[in-house]
Image: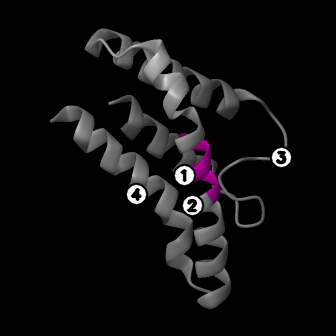
Amino acid sequence: MFCLGLVVFFVKQFHPSYGYFPYQGWFHWLLLALFFFLVGLDFAVIGLSAWLLLILFPLFIIAILGGTILMGKLKTMYRGGNAFMYIPLALFVFLAIVKLI
């Protein structure tokens, strides 16, 4: 449910020039930090070891960089497409659905 709340929050925060993250303020960073804290608690409840998360950390970094590069290439390939601004929110909705199942 928190993921869906994040989607609603970021849709309301959207600015055509600045995107989903405003150039001033820190509340959105607090919400994202709380989100990742809750994901960490979820991993702890499942019983995943902290060592497993540390071992997978480079994979997470590679995935984030790869996603950033892919989004940049798609954005330049299809200039002017308005659908790209909804991809991060669609990922949060997908994650919320997976967490509810």
- State left or right for residue 69 relative to residue 43: right
Q: Position of residue 81 (x, y in %)?
A: 56, 84
Which structural element holds mark 4?
Answer: helix
Q: Amino acid at mark 2?
A: Gly
Disc nearer the start of the sequence (3/1): 3
Count of numbered circles in the view: 4
Residue 8 sits inside the magenta stretch: no
Q: Give the image quarter of residue 1.
A: top left
Write down the residue under mark 3.
23
**C-beta proximity under 8 Å, tags 2 and 1:** yes
Q: Amino acid at mark 4?
A: Ala
Q: Position of residue 69 (x, y in %)?
A: 65, 67
Q: Position of residue 22 (x, y in %)?
A: 76, 47
Q: Circle 4: is it few (<14), some (14-19), or many (20+) Cα within 10 Å?
A: few
Q: Residue at x 62, y 89 (%)?
A: 77
Which structural element holds mark 2?
Answer: helix
- Marks 4 and 2, Cα distance to the nearest angstrom? 14 Å
- Marks 1 and 4, Cα distance to the nearest angstrom? 17 Å
- Marks 2 and 1, Cα distance to the nearest angstrom? 6 Å
Write down the residue under mark 2.
67
Magenta residues? 60-65
Q: Give the image quarter of residue 75.
A: bottom right
Q: Is residue 29 above or below residue 67?
A: above
Q: Residue at x 53, y 43 (%)?
A: 59
Q: Is residue 91 above or below residue 48?
A: below
Q: Residue at x 63, y 48 (%)?
A: 13
Q: Amino acid at mark 3?
A: Tyr
Q: Amino acid at mark 1?
A: Ala
Write down the residue under mark 1.
63
- Residue furthest to the left in view is 101
Write down the residue under mark 4.
90
